[in-house]
């Protein structure tokens, strides 16, 4: 399948083909764009502009199918785990239909609602269901961008659903942290299934603004300082780190809250590791910083862990790994 992840600042495309138990990479590409992301677009001209960038890239990298899976920004999708008594699959379906309205904060007839059964537990007599709802208007904009690029959208899911498929192994508990440009999305994944998600509007852009303010330099320079010195406490006498600290702490606090929520409300275990991804996850010294603040092993998520790549490709892709997690997960989705 082909997976297309349209972020705030860049579009990523991945095509995978199945080869026995593993996948092989057929095509990949990432391109930055200036302008507005589809969810924030207000007219067709803005959607057309994104679509033009997408169409050009897709042509360049050469994908072999027009059918694509796409991701919806976490921030515009409502996701929540809800509990029912022990029910059959049919009963869950009916219960979701009847009860979604009371959980979903958008009018139900203006929403696309989906759910997934996470667990049926005999001991606690309960069924855990992951409920997701996206405004129809937002979904339609992403569909429109694909259609304008002469692509056929087959399936849409949240970014974190796709990212988890690429990064998390099927057993164990992981916390995934996707640090993009406008949002940091986090999820807790248990045995391959999402059990918690959260999106906060603090990410790469906010880090750059903080460096600009803290060092009294312009945004262009700040972007460079952020990428070169990041969270290092020795480089530039730790001045960049000092500027980043207050904003980055917001992310750290949110991760702590997520873990606390999962442990208290869901009686869950501590995640064994934190898998970081997204453009801003490549900030220098982020790994020791997070490991120290959170006390949990932090590692770069490898989106190609389940894909067989030849050594040449591994080398070529190495600097861009953090960009592709969502697109890879989308390309792994098979109906
Ligand atoms: N080496 C680096 N150090 C720090 N930040 C970096 C580095 N490389 C890229 N970034 C930041 O990563 C961000 C872009 O990441 P990404 O492409 O994942 O975002 P996006 O998917 O377009 O955005 P979003 O997911 O928020 O919609 C930018 O803020 C950029 O400054
Ligand atoms: Mg992103």
Image (cartoon, grey):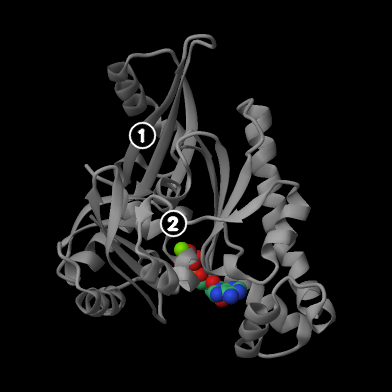
Q: Is residue 253 above or below residue 62?
A: above
Badge count: 2
x and y percentages locating residue 113 in the rendered image: 33, 39
| Residue at (76, 88) in percent of width and height | 216
Quarter-of-image position of residue 273 = top right
Closest to the observer: 222 or 324? 324
Closest to the observer: 34 or 171? 171
Crowd around label 2: few <14 · some 14–19 · many ≥20 (10 Å) = many
Res 303 label: 2
Res 242 label: none
Crowd around label 1: few <14 · some 14–19 · many ≥20 (10 Å) = some
Quarter-of-image position of residue 33 = bottom left
Of all residues shown, which one is farthest toward the front?
A: 311
x and y percentages locating residue 52 in the rendered image: 25, 79
Which residue is denoted by mark 1 in the rendering?
115
Instruction: Please report contact status of discs 2 and 1: CB closer than 8 Å, yes or no.
Output: no
Q: Quadrant of the N terminus?
A: bottom left
Q: Which comes sooner in the sequence, label 2 or label 1? A: 1
- The answer to whether 94 appears left or right of 274 in the picture is left
Front tag of 2 and 1: 2
- Mark 1 secondary-structure assignment: strand
Q: Is residue 159 above or below residue 210?
A: above
x and y percentages locating residue 302 in the rendered image: 48, 56
Q: For the residue with label 2, is its CB less than 8 Å from the closest atom of ligand 1?
A: no
Residue 136 in view of the camera: no
| Residue at (63, 40) in percent of width and height | 272
Residue 7 in view of the camera: yes
Q: Is residue 307 above or below residue 121?
A: below
| Residue at (77, 80) in percent of width and height | 214
x and y percentages locating residue 159 in the rendered image: 42, 53
Q: Is residue 193 above or below residue 74?
A: above
What separation in Å lies between label 2 and label 1 (alpha carbons)? 25 Å
């Amino acid at each position: 399948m082909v997976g297309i992840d349209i972020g705030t600042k860049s579009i990523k495309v991945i095509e995978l083909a199945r080869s026995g138990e593993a996948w092989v990479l057929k095509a990949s590409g990432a391109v930055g764009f200036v302008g507005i992301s589809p969810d924030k677009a207000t007219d067709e001209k803005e959607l057309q502009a994104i679509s033009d960038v997408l169409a050009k890239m897709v042509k360049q990298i050469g994908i072999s199918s027009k059918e694509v899976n796409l991701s919806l920004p976490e921030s515009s999708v409502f996701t929540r785990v809800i509990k029912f008594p022990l029910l059959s699959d049919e009963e869950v379906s009916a219960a979701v239909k009847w009860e979604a309205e009371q959980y979903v904060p958008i009018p139900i007839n203006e929403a696309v609602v989906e759910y997934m059964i996470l667990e049926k537990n005999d001991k606690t007599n309960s069924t855990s269901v992951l409920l997701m709802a996206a405004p129809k208007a937002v979904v339609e904009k992403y569909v429109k961008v694909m259609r304008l690029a002469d692509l056929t959208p087959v399936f849409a899911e949240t970014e974190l659903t796709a990212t988890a498929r690429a990064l998390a192994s099927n057993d164990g508990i992981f916390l995934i942290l996707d640090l993009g440009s406008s949002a940091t999305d986090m999820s807790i994944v248990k045995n391959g299934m999402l059990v918690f998600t959260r999106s906060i509007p603090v990410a790469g852009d906010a880090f750059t603004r903080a460096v600009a303010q803290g060092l009294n330099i312009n945004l262009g320079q700040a972007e460079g300082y952020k990428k070169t010195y990041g969270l290092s406490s020795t480089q530039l006498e730790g001045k960049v780190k000092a500027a980043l600290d207050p904003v980055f702490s917001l992310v750290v606090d949110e991760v702590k809250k997520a873990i606390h929520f999962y442990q208290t409300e869901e009686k869950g275990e501590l995640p064994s590791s934190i898998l970081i991804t997204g453009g801003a996850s490549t900030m220098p010294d982020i790994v020791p910083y997070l490991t120290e603040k959170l006390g949990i092993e932090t590692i770069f998520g490898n989106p190609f862990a389940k894909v067989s790549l030849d050594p040449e490709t591994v080398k070529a892709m190495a600097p861009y790994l953090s960009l592709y997690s969502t697109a890879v997960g989308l390309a792994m989705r098979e109906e």
